[in-house]
Image: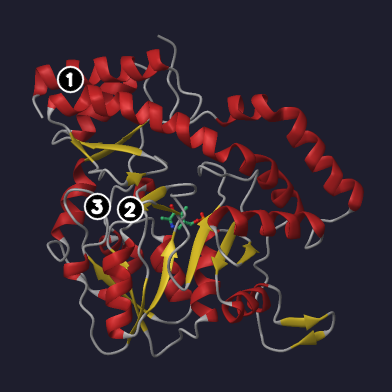
């Protein structure tokens, strides 16, 4: 079996090359590099896609989170709750505002924020739920806590583009909940640009206006700067690429779901940990994560068979060197810490072939037969 890469952006490009090339050329022809019609068109389509009133492009997902917090007025006196198992950018965005990060541990069965472990004390102004690996955090509990305690919710949807959750007959897409929801279009995400990109979606005109203002030098007119802002805008070329790719997102996600189904059917009987998925969940399967007690050995074993894997993430956020100033120690968020030592992300992308998935599963079975779980 030929090498199985972790991700295959090249083959995705081949399948839409003509459309992408012509979209990029149109931006260059129009010199619509910053702002302009390509950004506006994409923003409109992305708002429709997420069923939100407004969408504002951002330079990347971290900026989307940061600009949303700024728009909500989060600043130096405030504290924001962040799960201890996420990409560190979720926490970084809080620090960029000058606010304090307060970590909360995650649940063992799906590694999403554990609402029972959210410690809401004085100064807490907002929560950032993270749709880790593409599974949406159930909105009910989060929105209830937010309402009871008068907190803002900024949803980190950087891994859940196109994920869905249903309640009764209603279906909600990722990004639908919270005061603002934030997306990253980093190339490897389910909806990825050809460089950095991000977006904030919201139903609030005030938040949308404030995000736009902060992202563009606080500019209200060409030379009228109402506040000191930042330069965190989405580029025209990225917007044009994203507009092409958005049309394919649902079909690409469905292919990921088919791949995930094969993994789950083959691996569940072996007793491997996999993220718990409820019946009403239809995740985006940005990542397909398993756990094993000999994770590093397993990673090497698969690597020798030509199977590329990843770890998302090898350290819980509170134990990263970057957060040593917070004085956390091992044992503070035990579920995240244990998961960090056991998780392994298997290859998953729309273009992955059934034979490749079966080969990964055969290899896992071989490893388990020898080493146990
Ligand atoms: C990718 C990601 C981000 C940050 O996105 P960038 O575009 O890289 O800034 C934030 N949170 C999560 C959970 C992510 O996966």
Establish if 56 lies above or below 170.
below
User: Of discs 3 and 1, which sits in the foreground?
Assistant: 3
Say which element carries label 1: helix
Residue at position x 32%, y 28% from top? 261
Whole-number angstrom distance, CA of label 3 to CA of label 1: 24 Å
Circle 3: is it few (<14), some (14-19), or many (20+) Cα within 10 Å? many
Whole-number angstrom distance, CA of label 2 to CA of label 1: 41 Å
Say which element carries label 2: loop
Residue 201 in which image quadrant:
bottom right
Circle 2: is it few (<14), some (14-19), or many (20+) Cα within 10 Å? few
Horizontal and vertical percent position of residue 88: 39, 60
Q: Earlier in the sequence, mark 2 or mark 3?
A: 3
Q: Earlier in the sequence, mark 2 or mark 1?
A: 2
Establish if 40 lies above or below 94.
above
Residue at position x 36%, y 22% from top? 307
Pointers 2 and 1 in contact (C-beta within 8 Å): no
Residue at position x 32%, y 14% from top? 359
Horizontal and vertical percent position of residue 141: 26, 67
Query: Residue 195 versus residue 161: which sits nearer the camera?
Result: 161
Residue placed under numbered mark 3 in the picture: 111
Q: Is mark 1 within 8 Å of ligand 1?
A: no
Pointers 2 and 3 in contact (C-beta within 8 Å): no
Residue placed under numbered mark 2 in the picture: 168
Residue placed under numbered mark 1 in the picture: 367
With 291 as the anchor, is 244 left or right in this view?
right
Circle 1: is it few (<14), some (14-19), or many (20+) Cα within 10 Å? some
Whole-number angstrom distance, CA of label 2 to CA of label 3: 25 Å
With 195 as the anchor, is 63 left or right in this view?
left
């Amino acid at each position: 079996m030929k090498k199985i890469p972790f991700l295959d952006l090249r083959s995705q490009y081949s399948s839409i090359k003509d459309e992408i090339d012509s979209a990029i050329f149109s931006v260059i022809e129009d010199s619509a590099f910053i702002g302009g019609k390509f950004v506006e068109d994409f923003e409109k389509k992305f708002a429709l896609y997420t069923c939100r009133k407004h969408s504002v492009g951002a330079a990347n997902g971290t900026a989307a989170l940061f600009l949303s917090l700024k728009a909500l007025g989060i600043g130096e006196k405030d504290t924001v709750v962040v799960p201890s198992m996420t990409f560190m950018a979720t926490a970084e965005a809080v620090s960029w505002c000058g606010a304090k990060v307060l970590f909360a541990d995650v649940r063992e069965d799906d590694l999403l924020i554990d609402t029972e472990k959210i410690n809401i004390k004085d100064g807490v102004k907002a929560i950032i739920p993270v749709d880790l690996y593409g599974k949406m955090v159930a909105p009910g509990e989060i929105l209830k806590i937010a309402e009871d305690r008068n907190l803002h919710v900024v949803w980190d949807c950087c891994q859940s583009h196109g994920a869905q959750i249903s309640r009764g007959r209603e279906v909600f897409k990722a990004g639908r909940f919270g005061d603002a929801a934030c997306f990253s279009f980093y190339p490897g995400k389910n909806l990825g640009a050809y460089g950095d990109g991000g977006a904030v979606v919201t139903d609030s005109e005030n938040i949308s206006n404030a995000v736009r203002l902060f992202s563009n030098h606080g500019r209200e007119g060409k030379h009228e700067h109402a506040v000191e802002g930042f330069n965190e805008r989405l580029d025209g070329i990225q917007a044009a690429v994203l507009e092409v790719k958005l049309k394919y997102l649902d079909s690409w996600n469905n292919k990921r779901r088919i791949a995930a189904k094969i993994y789950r059917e083959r691996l569940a009987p072996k007793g491997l940990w996999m993220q718990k998925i409820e019946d009403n969940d239809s995740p985006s399967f940005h990542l397909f994560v398993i756990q094993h007690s000999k994770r590093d050995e397993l990673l090497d074993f698969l690597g020798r068979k030509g199977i590329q894997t990843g770890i998302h993430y090898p350290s819980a956020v509170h134990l990263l060197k970057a957060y040593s100033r917070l004085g956390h120690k091992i044992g503070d968020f035990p579920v995240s810490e244990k998961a960090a030592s056991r998780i392994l992300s298997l290859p998953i992308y729309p273009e992955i072939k059934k034979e490749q998935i079966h080969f990964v599963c055969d290899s896992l079975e071989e490893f388990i037969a020898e080493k146990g779980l």
